Amino acid sequence: MIAHQLTLVRRELWEHRSIWVTPVAIGVVVSLLVMAMLVFASGFAKELDVAIFGAQNLAGEEQRSIALIMHFLGTSWIFLIALAILTVFYCLDSLYAERKDKSILFWRSLPVTDAETVLSKLLTAVFVIPLITCAGIFVTHLVNLVVTSIWVSTKGGSAGTLIWSSLPIIDIWLFTFIVVISSAIWMSPFVGWFLLVSAWTKRMPLLVAFMPIIVIPLLEWIVFRTRFFASAVGERGDNLPIFHIGDIEMLFEGDEWLRNIPDVQLLDLIDIGKFMAHPETWIGIIVCGLLTTAAIYVRRFRDES
Amino acid sequence: MTSLVTARGVSKHFGQVRAVDNVSFEIEKGRILGLIGPNGAGKTTLLKALLGLTDCDGDLSVLGLDPFRQRKKLMQNICFIADVAVLPRWIKVSQLLDYVEGVHPNFSRKRAEGFLAHTKVQSGAKVRELSKGMVTQLHLSIIMAIDAKLLVLDEPTLGLDILFRKEFYANLLNDYFDEERTILVTTHQVEEIENLLTDIMFINDGKILLDSSMDTLTETYIELMASGENAVKAKGLGPIAESEIFGKSVMLFEGVSREHLQELGELRIPSVADLFVAKIKEARK
């Protein structure tokens, strides 16, 4: 059963090479940018930490640590944006392309149920793509750490004290991992919706998928003067209920906030228990389940002739 | 029980259209059955019902299973090639073998690779880089490496040139078929396969016009070539079809004794194609 699913998921990675090509490409670009930044910045100033992290003057250990953390989380952010776009396109293509090129007749000639097939696509979207993205982030971090360390060493500084001891890299990785996986679960109703559209639409899956998200709130407002749908969709896009602070954007807004917390403990910012206990987390999982079931149903009962 | 497929009153409607209309038949083990019918006759719908790709009314049992509800179990013992080139174009040959090996308990990779070794298909090539003939060879190699009880071929050689078509059926007969296996094939090119069929079924407008073994067929249907008075006499015996060739009448008889006809002219075994045309015309009257 598990070996079976593994084969199906491998198949997804063969077909959608962008799942791993994209993180690799971003990793390469980010690493090159960091190298360029090191060379560029060191032309202006001689102080090592300034050379490493741009023009901001860093006073003291604490601020260097914060700057390092921000730098590494910022790197992760680029991956996460790509992850979101990648997942949308992957889901919309996953059950549509096979119908368009009629290869669905081949896939269905093998002893694999429609449920197993659709499940493999759900697993790929909610776990495999996020895990590969995490791997991409970690490798890029490591490359950047090594490059920066070498740079600092060649400038006569101690990479150990200046970088490694100031940077809680394991915390950053754990933090990234938990946020990425919980975001994927949190966003899973959208994955379910995209899978359903992909299984069902005759053409233009992208348009069909996004049209209701725009049209339904409009109609709701015109007819009922309410905003339930818009706020339900909007809030899901906005608030991941895993952070102790209200909004993850605050992490990046402001010196004010950073200064108020003298000792940044990244993992203290998140609370898995809160996420798991949040009713909307479970509502999302149920909605995802229902939409995925609908996608299975459509694939099974639709006659392609 | 040697019956592999049993259909009792099977129907499939699309709105008002009856694609398959109350058909009943059996397919026995170790046979090669040709399913022949014009476009839109309901062949593909019937095959889809057999393969569990579409639901239908009536009782349909394939290998003792309900095809629609037990599709996964069924597919472990059935293989099929559909009428369109359906192998995904993005996949590599080696990946395709990996995949089938991963999901199919009755697939022998070694056998498939053995078959492929006789072709020009390279394991590193992608399907989109292969010619249509090579794609069919690849598909057939995979299918033949699956130890299945029933093989369903829906226009398997469509769009292939004559060399590939001949080779396709030769491979099927020599390397695959034995008394444990059963093949169900539909094709427009009846003349190419009529020699290898053991049974034949005509279908038109969702109904079965003829369901017979080839042996019975040659006994039941006789073609007579006659001229002059004999032709007039023969006409009196009620041929199901007649035409003129080189000034002679060619008539097709159903169930008229051979001795009776022998005196009237030259007897021949009718081709499946001629028989098919006659049956369709008869049904449309």
Image (spheres, rainbow, N blue to C red):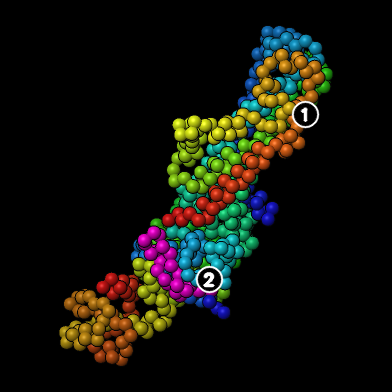
Question: Taken as a whole, is the magenta stretch helix, strand or loop?
Answer: strand
Which residue position is annotated with label 2? B61
**Image coords of residue A107 (percent x, y):** 54, 54
**Image coords of residue B53 (percent x, y):** 50, 60
Q: In this rendering, is residue B227 above or below A9?
A: below
Tell me if I can see residue B108 in this picture.
no
Amino acid type assigned to the residue bearing label 1 in the image: Leu
For image coordinates 70% across by 36% down, the residue present is A278
Q: In this rendering, is residue A250 above or below A22?
A: above
For image coordinates 54% across by 65% down, the residue present is B67
- State how far apart marks 2 and 1 are (Cα): 59 Å
**Image coords of residue A150 (percent x, y):** 75, 21
Query: Left or right: where does residue A250 sit relative to residue B22?
Result: right
Q: In this rendering, is residue B195 above or below B154?
A: below
Q: Are tags 2 and 1 found on a single chain?
A: no
| Viewer-nearest residue: B9 or A126 | B9
**Image coords of residue A24 (percent x, y):** 63, 33
Which residue position is annotated with label 1? A267
Which stretch did the figure color magenta? B4-25
